[in-house]
């Protein structure tokens, strides 16, 4: 009964029960099985028989690690591949693959960073180029960035910039109603957009222009006009 097998049981029993559990697809049991037979040296009575298990179980874990790379990314894949013992015939191959995964992941990080810089500086074509490269990567986390997440961000960043451009075009008249409308437009720029800081700068500038207009009207004894202009200044712009 494998439920009764433990570290004090014979190696034969442990190896047999490890194989039984591994057949169920349990990853933890697979790793434990590799640790068991991976530590046996050539003078162990079960060494020859264990080498077949060592190779087969290593191949199984390596395949799972590759799948983890495709679906989850570098951390999960490397964690599993590193469980293949040095005594395994797949050890060197697994270590080389780990290096490749880490390099590929770093490449994805570089592309992501360059994409964000391009978005921040309104270099839409450059951003799209990096996004396309990410979409071709063979690991799902970065591919999703290239296919779904970053294209959506690109559209949002472009929309935010267009809001600023529209507001600036409206504000050119320096008329209180237009300045108020321009402020209302930039107030709609999302906090998470790169254009947000510029939107706040424009908001402050146009609020100051409204106050200047109100002051000039007051000095010209146009009290009604002064009140009208002052009323268009956002409350949060008044310190």
Image (spheres, rainbow, N blue to C red):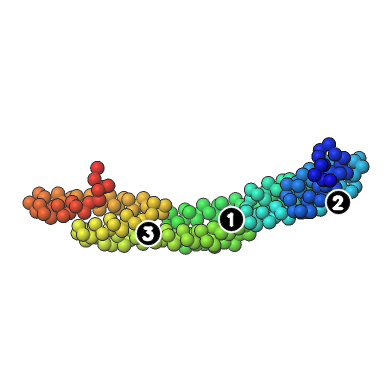
The 10 Å Cα crowd at callout 3, few under 14, some 14 to 19, many 20 or more, is many
The 10 Å Cα crowd at callout 2, few under 14, some 14 to 19, many 20 or more, is few
Q: Secondary structure at mark 3?
A: helix
- In the image, is residue 214 above or below residue 132? above
The disc, 3 or 2, on the residue closer to the chain's N-terminal end is: 2
Q: Secondary structure at mark 1?
A: helix
Q: Which residue is mark 3?
A: 161
Q: Secondary structure at mark 2?
A: helix
Q: How many marks?
A: 3
The disc, 1 or 2, on the residue closer to the chain's N-terminal end is: 2
Say which residue appears at 51% left-offset and 52% top-offset.
113
Dot 1 and dot 2 residues touching (CB under 8 Å): no
Question: Residue 203 appears at what percent x and percent y?
Answer: 29, 52
Tell me the tag on residue 52. 2
Instruction: Using the rendered image of the protein, determine whether residue 102 is visible from the camera's viewpoint.
Output: no
Report the side of 190 relative to 98 (left or right).
left
Question: Residue 96 appears at what percent x and percent y?
Answer: 72, 50
Q: Which residue is mark 1?
A: 141
């Amino acid at each position: 009964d494998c439920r009764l097998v433990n570290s004090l049981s014979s190696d034969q029993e442990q190896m047999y029960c490890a194989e039984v559990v591994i057949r169920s697809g349990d990853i933890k049991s697979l790793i434990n099985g590799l640790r068991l037979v991976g530590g046996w040296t050539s003078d162990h009575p079960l060494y020859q028989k264990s080498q077949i298990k060592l190779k087969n179980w290593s191949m199984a874990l390596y395949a799972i690690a590759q799948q983890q790379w495709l679906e989850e990314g570098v951390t999960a894949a490397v964690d599993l591949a590193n469980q293949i013992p040095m005594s395994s015939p797949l050890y060197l191959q697994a270590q080389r693959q780990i290096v490749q995964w880490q390099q590929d992941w770093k490449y994805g990080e570089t592309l992501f960073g360059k994409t964000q810089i391009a978005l921040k500086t309104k270099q839409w074509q450059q951003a799209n180029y990096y996004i396309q490269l990410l979409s071709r990567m063979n690991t799902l986390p970065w591919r999703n960035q290239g296919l779904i997440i970053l294209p959506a961000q690109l559209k949002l960043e472009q929309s935010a910039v267009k809001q600023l451009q529209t507001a600036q075009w409206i504000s050119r008249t320096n008329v209180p109603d237009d300045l108020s409308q321009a402020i209302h437009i930039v107030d709609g720029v999302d906090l998470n957009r790169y254009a947000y800081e510029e939107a706040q700068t424009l908001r402050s500038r146009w609020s100051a222009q409204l106050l200047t207009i109100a002051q000039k009207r007051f000095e010209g004894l146009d009290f009604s006009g002064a009140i009208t202009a002052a009323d268009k200044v956002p409350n949060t712009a008044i310190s």
